[in-house]
Amino acid sequence: MQPRCATVHFWSLCEMSQVGQDAQVRTTAQRTAMSAIEKVERLALFNLAIDSKLRGCDLVALRVRDVVQGSHVCARAIVMQRKTQRPVQFEITEQTREAIDTWITTAHLKLMQFLFPSRVTESPHLSTRQYSRIVGSWVASIGLDPAAYGTHSLRRTKPTLIYRRTRNLRAVQLLLGHTKLESTVRYLGIEVDDALEIAEQTEV
């Protein structure tokens, strides 16, 4: 596979806002060249974390074969979740496919290899702790407190935006792979948000 572009572009700014008891990441439309700032692997990891909406343990355990068919990165993929032992499907946008393709080509990865190999010999792939530290470095790089944001901030980003635009809670439940709708409600903290919106629109 050959990278489609020499310089990979992605969001240069990430706006983070509080949702429920945790935080979410809202990406802006502004894009800039990040190849000089982040390694190719980190760009692919960040993009895929946003698109896949996977828990950290599932994201770091992805193999190349999970997102690649033939010589192309798939537009959609499906994996088995460790926590629920249920399959979940996710989309891979064009910019994410380009980042993944560039990373696979650069690292000379084979289909059976982990997509994000660990540089620690005793670990076959990036650990959740390593992933958490990487996210912390991303948060710090845009001037925010790493203690306030974690890997779930990336997982929550797209579902939160989808819900705010569509109010389709069932769709968000499917995207997150939750078995119960109540879990999605608690995860997004939408009951509180919706109640506040109603209150703000009500005059006495």
Image (cartoon, rainbow, N blue to C red):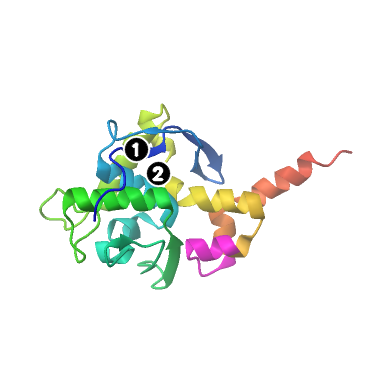
Q: Is residue 42 magenta?
A: no
Q: Quadrant of residue 147?
A: top left
Residue 136's label in the rendered image is: 1
Q: Where 155 sits versus 147, above or below?
A: below
User: What kind of residue is marked 1?
Assistant: Gly
* Disc 2 crowd, CA 10 A, few/some/many (<14, 14-19, 20+): many
Residue 150's label in the rendered image is: 2
For residue 82, side relative to residue 125 (left or right): right
Q: Is residue 172 magenta?
A: yes
Q: Where 69 sits versus 94, above or below?
A: below
Q: Tell me the SS state at disc 1.
A: helix
* Residue under the image location 18 percent in, 57 percent down: 109
Q: Quadrant of the C terminus?
A: top right
Q: Majority secondary structure of the magenta segment? A: helix
* Residue under the image location 51 percent in, 50 percent down: 158
* Residue under the image location 62 percent in, 60 percent down: 169
Q: Where 195 sits versus 67, above or below?
A: above
* Residue under the image location 57 percent in, 56 percent down: 186
Give the percent coordinates (x, y) of residue 91: 45, 60
Report the span colored magenta: 171-181
For residue 38, side relative to residue 18 (left or right): left
Which is nearer the eye, 156 or 19? Answer: 156
The disc, 2 or 1, on the residue closer to the chain's N-terminal end is: 1
